[in-house]
Image (cartoon, grey):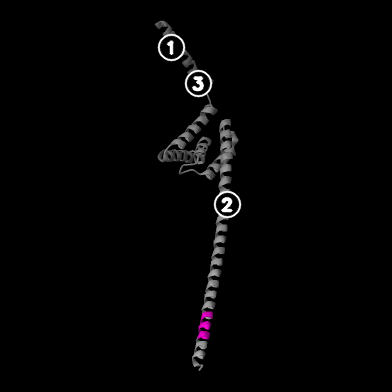
Amino acid sequence: MPRSGWLALALAAGLAAGCSAVDDWSGLGRKPSSAPPPALDDGTVVAAYLVTLERLGRGGAAEQAEILESSRSAYLADPSTRHRLRYAFVLAVPGHAGADAAGARTLLGEALAVPETLLASERALAELMVRDLDARLALAQENATLRADTSTGERDRIASLNRRLQQETAEKERLRRELEEARAKLDAIAALEGGSAARQP
């Protein structure tokens, strides 16, 4: 483009900016003080959550601790929907020191209680995670109940075995005493019979 063309373009841009400024001075083009928040793309938001979860699943203990602490700090500083969901998803992933299925379930329940604050993909991912957490928590509860029942049954079985052992020990002791008494009587009888035989002519 010739230099004169660039100058004409710059002049047109300057005039447009000047008109905009004049509109602002007059109040005709004044915008609201708070700009609307930028539109969020569902795919981008969910992809960010998934990247965090992938890092958490593949990372070592130090990286896992860092991800947990950063998501926790962000949530405590600003408990917005995005921070709440990210922290809940991190807590929901099993296999790291900070995993907390019950805590994750609580946070997701709070987020889903106000669905208007969630994007459609966020709500779908949160609902999917809730179903998984509910199944895991139910299984954990069932296992705990089985362990408790097994422990109670095992304690009862051991107590029963101990009672039987005590009864058998007492019975053996009684039989031992009776045997000793019988031997003593036999010895006494033998001694008497021996003495009688010796006195006969």
Closer to the chain start, of discs 1 and 2, is 1
At which x and y percent is residue 105? 55, 42
The residue shown at (51%, 18%) is 23
Q: Is 159 a magenta residue? A: no
At which x and y percent is residue 168? 55, 69
Would you say residue 105 is visible in this rendering? yes
Q: Are marks 1 and 2 in contact (CB under 8 Å)?
A: no
Q: Amino acid at mark 2?
A: Leu
Highlighted magenta segment, given as a residue range:
182-190
Q: Which residue matches tag 3?
A: 24
Q: Amino acid at mark 1?
A: Ala
Question: What is the CA distance from the residue labelled 1 to the residue labelled 2?
Answer: 79 Å
Q: Which residue matches tag 2?
A: 146
Q: Which residue matches tag 1?
A: 10
Q: Which mark is residue 178?
A: none
User: Which element carries disc 1, helix, strand or loop?
Assistant: helix
